[in-house]
């Protein structure tokens, strides 16, 4: 944010010294987008205000504002609103992209990874196991009578149950492990560097917690 504001100040000083017939609005916009991308919406809004102010001063050409002060004020306000709107739209676009990326790896109902995420993690674990000769385990979990829950109290309650199950499994594994919902009532666990005995003990603890 500080670097972006400094860039706007330098640009504003240059704009102030140059002939007012030249407009550097695109450069202000570039500074805004860089700051908004790296520091977020609030920092972008701050740079938008600073950029609009610098642009307004730069349009005086280093002298007193033109006689038509009303037009100058209107144009300055227009630039300010334009930069703020662009900052807002850019932030919304970034949020949408981040959300779509998160959903591409996350099951929206349970909140844990989806099948694509799980296969990616398994592929990575297989490569590590081949390199270092360490074991790993995969556990499959099937939720009994989920359809009965949906039929008795509604699908929303069933989704709530799946969410609770996902959170419980996520809290019950190590950071190096992975949990995913494969679809329907099926979940899977990837237990890194875990042999059969360790996997059985881990799953037994999880089942006790779930029960």
Image (tube, helix red, strand yellow):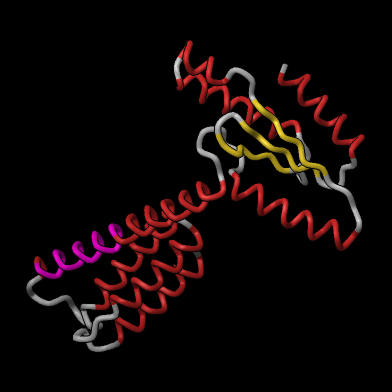
The correct choice, above or below, for 172 with respect to 47 in the image is: above
Q: Is residue 193 visible?
A: yes
Residue at 66%, 28% (x, y): give it.
142
Along the horizontal axis of the image, is 207 left or right of 35?
right
- The residue located at (50%, 65%) in the rendering is 2
Q: Nearer the viewer, residue 65 or 3?
A: 3
Residue found 41% across the figure and 78% down from its top = 10
Give coordinates of residue 190: x percent, y percent.
Answer: 75, 43
User: Looking at this rendering, what residue extends furthest in the top direction?
Assistant: 152
Q: Is residue 167 magenta?
A: no
In the figure, 165 relative to 128: above or below?
Answer: above
Task: Identify the image quadrant of residue 185.
Answer: top right
User: What percent of the width, then of the height, locates residue 160?
Assistant: 53, 23
Instruction: Give the dominant element type of the magenta stretch: helix, strand or loop.
Output: helix
The vertical placement of 183 against 117, above or below, is above
From this viewpoint, is residue 42 visible?
Answer: no
**Residue 102 location, x and y as percent?**
53, 49
Magenta segment: 71-85
* Residue drawn at 69 percent across, 34 percent down: 170
Does 27 sit above or below residue 146? Answer: below
Q: Picture coordinates of residue 168 (x, y %)?
A: 68, 27
Q: Is the C terminus in the top left, top right, bottom left or bottom right quadrant?
A: top right
Q: Is residue 18 left or right of residue 173?
A: left
Q: Nearer the viewer, residue 33 or 59?
A: 33
Q: How many marks?
A: 0
- State the residue in front, 31 or 152: 152
């Amino acid at each position: 944010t500080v670097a972006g504001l400094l860039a706007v100040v330098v640009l504003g000083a240059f704009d102030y010294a140059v002939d007012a017939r030249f407009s550097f609005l695109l450069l202000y916009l570039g500074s805004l987008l860089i700051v908004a991308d790296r520091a977020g919406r609030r920092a972008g809004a701050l740079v938008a205000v600073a950029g609009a102010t610098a642009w307004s001063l730069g349009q005086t050409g280093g002298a007193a504002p033109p006689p038509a002060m009303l037009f100058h004020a209107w144009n300055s306000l227009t630039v300010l609103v334009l930069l703020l709107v662009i900052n807002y739209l850019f932030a919304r676009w970034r949020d949408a992209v981040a959300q779509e990326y998160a959903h591409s790896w996350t099951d929206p109902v349970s909140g844990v990874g989806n099948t694509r995420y799980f296969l990616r993690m398994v592929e990575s674990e297989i490569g590590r196991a081949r390199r270092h000769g360490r074991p790993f385990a995969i556990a499959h979990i099937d939720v009994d009578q989920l359809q009965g829950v949906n039929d008795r109290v509604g699908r929303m309650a069933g989704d709530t149950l799946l969410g609770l199950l996902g959170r419980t499994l996520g809290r019950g594994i190590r950071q190096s492990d992975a949990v995913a919902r494969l679809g329907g009532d099926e979940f899977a666990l990837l237990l890194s560097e875990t042999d059969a005995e360790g996997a059985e003990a881990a799953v037994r603890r999880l089942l006790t917690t779930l029960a």
